[in-house]
Amino acid sequence: MRTGRLEAFSDGVIAIIITIMVLEIKVPHGHELAELQSLLPVFISYVLSFIYIGIYWNNHHHMFQAAEHVNGAVLWANIHLLFWLSLVPFASGWMGENHFALWPVVLYGFILLMNGMAYYILLRVLIKLHGENSTLGIAIGKDVKGKISVVIYSIAIALAFVSPWIGLALYGVVAAMWLIPDTRIEKRLVEKSAE
């Protein structure tokens, strides 16, 4: 099977996720700028979540540029990733509405952790389908950045019990690590076309 339908479906789901997130920002009833101050935690939560969804979309796009075909296992692994991504608006909204309280921050981190693990599973399933010596397999290599991200999420969740702000800061660190698009796949695709 080709990758086109999977990519189109994933793009649609991700677009809906972003739409749901922005709808979580309720318009204030007043008309003064001071009315917006109460929305600051919700807005910060939205910005962090928007960045995360953008990172996943970007890397998902690159991953499937290197994939030549998909099978049933890839389809299910992709659905698994989309499931965890679809929970980001709920956790993001809960976290912002409750001004970064302990349990909302912990749940948010757990969902980020599960997104990272689901992405890793999808990546491994694609590499298994295409082979370790495929464009994707060579480009990803040992995926140190992905593994470090999962470790940081785990540490952040634990440290959130000390202070939710520490957990939140570490979620921001992981986002910053991935904010610059992962160029491993792009480089490998350029190398392959030059061969």
Image (tube, rainbow, N blue to C red):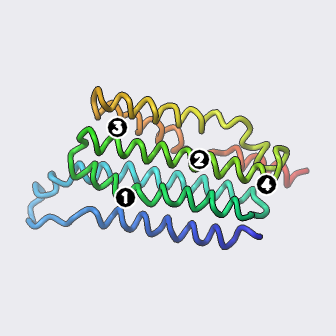
Q: Which residue has dot 1 on it?
A: 89
Percent position of residue 9, x then y: 58, 71
Quadrant location of residue 22?
Answer: bottom left
Counting residues from the N terminus, which is met first, the one under dot 2 or under dot 1? 1
Residue type beneath disc 2 = Pro
Residue type beneath disc 1 = Pro
Residue type beneath disc 3 = Leu
Counting residues from the N terminus, which is met first, the one under dot 4 or under dot 3? 4
Q: Which residue has dot 3 on it?
A: 168
Contact (Cβ within 8 Å) of mark 1 with mark 4 = no
Percent position of residue 30, x then y: 8, 65
Quadrant location of residue 28?
Answer: bottom left
Percent position of residue 21, x then y: 35, 62
Q: CA distance from mark 2 to mark 4?
A: 24 Å
Say which element carries label 2: loop
Q: Which residue has dot 4 on it?
A: 129
Q: Which residue has dot 2 on it?
A: 181
Counting residues from the N terminus, which is met first, the one under dot 2 or under dot 4? 4
Contact (Cβ within 8 Å) of mark 2 with mark 4 = no
Q: CA distance from mark 2 to mark 1?
A: 22 Å
Q: CA distance from mark 1 to mark 3?
A: 16 Å
Q: Is residue 1 above or below residue 124?
A: below
Q: Is residue 27 above or below residue 194?
A: below
